[in-house]
Amino acid sequence: MEKLIITVAITGGMHGKVTNPNIPEQPEEQAQQVLDAWNAGASVAHIHARDKNGFSVQDVEIYKEVGERIRAKGCDIILQYTTGGSPHMTMEEKLQSIYADPEMASLNMGITNTPLPNGEFYTFAINPPQIIHYVEEMNKRNIKPEMEVYAPNMLRQVNMLIEKGLLKKPYYVNFVMNMVAQGTVAATRENFFFLVDQLPPDTIYNVCALGQGQLPMTTYSILSGGMARVGMEDNIYYAKGELAKSNSQLVERTVRIANEVQRPIASPDEARRILGLK
């Protein structure tokens, strides 16, 4: 097995301090929590920018500020910016984060239909031409896509990109599990290993799962040779009824589990080698 790459997803694009007051929203608190997670063992930081009022934005300048603050703290973590955004954004708005020049960016691979608190539904729909456009824009900037797969059918889009020669090896897929949404899969052992079995050759897989699915699914991934993503974007709790105090708290637990099963943790530079980043 390669060393374990731990991604910390610090904020997310929808929920905020109302759900957990420890979620970092402003650039300095985001930078500090990334630093703490890096010190705990994370080698990739998945970031959503927020405006002064805490709302999700794809503002290039805010992403640049977050990145600069992280680097000013002496932190060499891999910066991965979202292109998922939030419900009110157009496809081109969601793409703006890559113009802040991260090393990696997320790339959703299909359609999900998510219920919102007001009873409406947020349909995230990215079609194959849009996926190709996103990848081409990333390739121009030497940004590696992390392909977000919510269900087995989305692996068809991964294979499509490979067949078109738009991806560089190793390919990097993140399984997103346990969303309460149409077009997604539950966080079960059977679903996890089925997804792994469908991967094309030369693919490294990562897994994140929402809520109570986070701990078991990342543990399966650690044991089976995959990578792990934790953080308050996906899970605001540390245990049942206990809010997470910080993102580093969730990283620290993942490191302890990996140490117990003797899976070494990758540093950011080791993660760059594994992922084929320059």
Image (cartoon, rainbow, N blue to C red):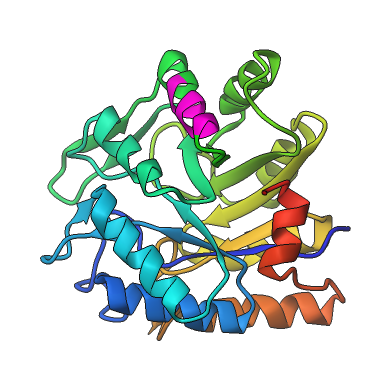
The residue closer to the viewer here, 12 or 140, is 140
165, above or below 123, in the image = above
Q: For the image shown, how many numbered marks are present on the structure?
A: 0
Counting from the top left corner in percent of width and height, residue 205 is at: 70, 46
Q: Quadrant of residue 12?
A: bottom left
Please identify the quarter of the rendering in which residue 64 is found: bottom left
Q: Which residues are magenta?
A: 133-140
Percent position of residue 196, x then y:
75, 40
Side of 60 relative to 102 (left or right):
left
Against 40, is 178 above or below? above
Residue 136 painted magenta = yes
The answer to which of 104 and 86 lies nearer the viewer is 104
* Residue 141 image offset from top left, x and y in percent: 50, 37
Q: Is residue 99 above or below residue 38?
A: above
Residue at the image point whose x is 43% and y is 77% from the top: 72
Q: Relative to residue 143, is residue 216 drawn left or right?
A: right
